[in-house]
Image (spheres, rainbow, N blue to C red):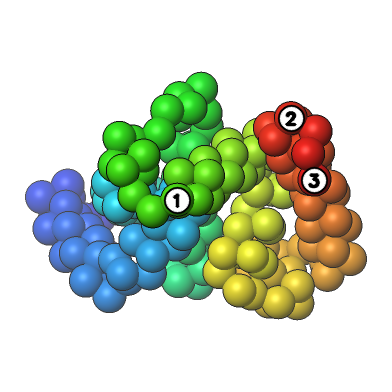
Amino acid sequence: MGTATAEETIPGLINEVERLFRAHHGLVFRTAYRITGNATDAEDVLQTVFLRLAGRNGSAQPLENCESYLRRAAINAALDVLRARRGAATLPLEDFQAEPGLAERRELRDGLRRALASLNPEAAQVFALRFFEGYSNGEIARLLGISQVRVAVTLHRARRRLQKEMRSYMGGKQ
C-alpha cells in the first residue's frame, strides 16, 4: 500500500470540491443572502466557503454532514461580512428615490444586521438558523451538537441583546 502523491491527490480534491459546489452552491448562496441582504456579499460568502472547504479537504478528512457543515460555514462567513461592514452606515441612493417608507425599512434591516454582527458567534449562528433559516430548536441542537436547553437560552439572550441594540439604534423608540 503506497502513499498518494500530491499529483494524485490534487485532481481528486478539485473534483470533490467541484461536485460539492454543484450540489450545494444554491444552499450556501441563499443562506448568506438571508443574513447579508446583499447578492454581492452572498457571492463573496459563496466563494469564501468553497475556498475554505478546498483548504480543509487538503487534510483528507471527509465531511460527516456536508449540508450542515456548508450551512454553518455560510452563516459564519456571512457574519464575518457583516462584522467587516459594521461601521458603514450608509444607504444606497436608490433607497431615497423609492416609495415612502422603503428607506426606513431598509435602514431598520441594516440596523438589525449590524446588531446581529455584534453577537458572539454561537448566538449569531443560533439566531440565524432559527429566524433566517427556519430551523426548530431541536434541529438546531442536532446541527450544532448542543442541547435544546442551550439553544433556547442562547436564543433568549440573543433576542434580548438584539432588542437592546435595536432600541439604542432607534434612539430609544419602541
Residue with the most extreme front position: 100
Q: Quadrant of residue 61?
A: bottom left
Q: CA distance from mark 1 to mark 3?
A: 20 Å
Q: x and y percent of residue 19 in the render?
A: 22, 71
- Per the image, the residue denoted by label 2 is 171
For the residue marked with disc 3, what is the amino acid?
Gln
Is the C-beta separation of discs 2 and 3 under 8 Å?
Answer: no
Q: CA distance from mark 2 to mark 1?
A: 21 Å
Q: Could you tell me if residue 102 is visible in this image?
A: yes
User: Counting other residues with Cα less than 10 Å from the Cα at mark 3, is it few (<14), some (14-19), or many (20 or more)?
Assistant: few
| Earlier residue among tags 2 and 1 | 1
Quarter of the picture holding the N terminus? bottom left
Name which residue lies at 84% across and 64% down: 152
Q: Quadrant of residue 136?
A: bottom right
Number of the label disc, if any, that sits on residue 100: 1
Q: CA distance from mark 2 to mark 3?
A: 9 Å
User: Helix, strand, or loop for circle 3?
Assistant: loop
Quick one: 7 or 160, which is closer to the camera? 160
Name which residue lies at 66% across and 67% down: 130
Is the C-beta separation of discs 2 and 1 under 8 Å?
Answer: no
- Per the image, the residue denoted by label 3 is 174
Q: Is residue 124 left or right of residue 52?
A: right
